[in-house]
Image (cartoon, coloured by chain):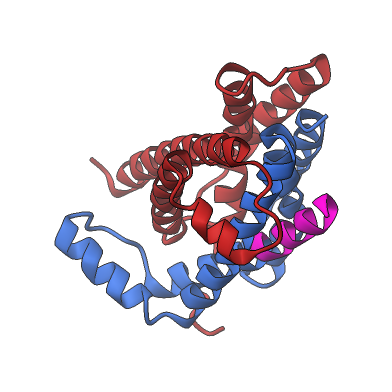
Chain colours: A blue, B red
Amino acid sequence: MKWILVFMLICATTIGDVFRSLGMRRHGEIHDFRPGAIGTVLSALGRNKYVIISTCSMAVSFFSFMKLVSIAPMSFAVPMSAATFIPETLLAKYLLKEAVDWRRWIGAGLIAIGVVFVSQ
Amino acid sequence: MPATEALHSKTRLFTVITVLSNVAGNSALTRGMQQLGDPGDSPFALIGALFHPWVALGVALLIVWTLSHMALLSWADLSYVLPVTASAYVLTAFSGKFLLGETISLTRWAGIILITVGVTLVGRTPADTREMTTRL
């Protein structure tokens, strides 16, 4: 059960993050953080199909995480979610067209290994 | 303040908010779920758990995390945001030790150092390198 939840968490988080990034880029940079302006932004995001897909996927991720921490320590559950680093960095490069240079690859690799160590 | 410097400051501020709300939210959620125990396989039990005070606090903090993460992604690359917010993993380990009574072994310390080096390395790259994605 624990590993099924980890698998669900990783897949849902990866899909959620990539679509969230796509949706927010399509929306554009947020400049104004006054309450009225934030309401306008949230209203626009509620109609953004990428953000809607991301939110549904993040809901699956959230409930998987909730169930996981009820049967495993947080110091296991949280680092396991870092397994998303590799697929997300690959998708950032090839789907989102980001310039992922050697520093980002090495950094992401070190963090992924570090997270595995932290989960021991 | 020049536009680039303003963007750097905004990125740093939202990175700190994202990391702190994530760590505090996960810690509160875990504390609540551990007090409740395994809710079983019923989705209604999971929804019911949302009304436990610690779980509710965790959810509120994770909503802050979601909004600050979304704001950050409106101007910064995913391949930048993902690693620089990874310092949350280090803080989560400390939170697990001091708030939830979990232990930090030598291996875990080694992991914390690797994560810190990785975050520092990625933090030295520009936050925004992406081409316009509106054509997707």
Residue B53 image offset from top left, x and y in percent: 42, 41
- Write the residue at 78% across / 20% down: B110
Position above or below: A33 against B53? below
Residue B90 lies, with reference to residue A9, above or below; the image says above
Q: Which of B116 and B23 is in front in this view?
A: B23
Q: Give the range drawn in magenta.
A: A1-13
Q: Is residue A3 left or right of residue B28?
A: right
Q: Which quadrant of the structure image shows residue B102? A: top right
Quadrant of the image for the C terminus of chain B?
Answer: bottom right
Residue A104 at x, y = what percent?
A: 68, 46
Q: Which of B71 and B133 is in front in this view?
A: B71
Residue B131 visible to an observer of this rendering:
no
Q: Does the magenta stretch include residue B96?
A: no
Extreme residue in the bottom direction: B135
Q: Residue at x 65, y 27 (%)?
A: B116
- Front residue (pair A63, A54): A63
Look at the image and tell me in which quarter the N terminus of chain B lies.
top left
Instruction: Determine the residue positioned at 52% across, 51% down.
Output: B49
Majority secondary structure of the magenta segment?
Answer: helix
Q: In this view, does A98 lie above or below B63?
A: below
Q: Where is residue B14 in the image (x, y as percent from the top left)?
A: 39, 43
In this rendering, position of residue B123 left or right of residue A64: left
Task: Choose between A116 and A29: the one closer to the eye.
Answer: A116
Quarter-wise, where is residue A10 in the image?
A: bottom right
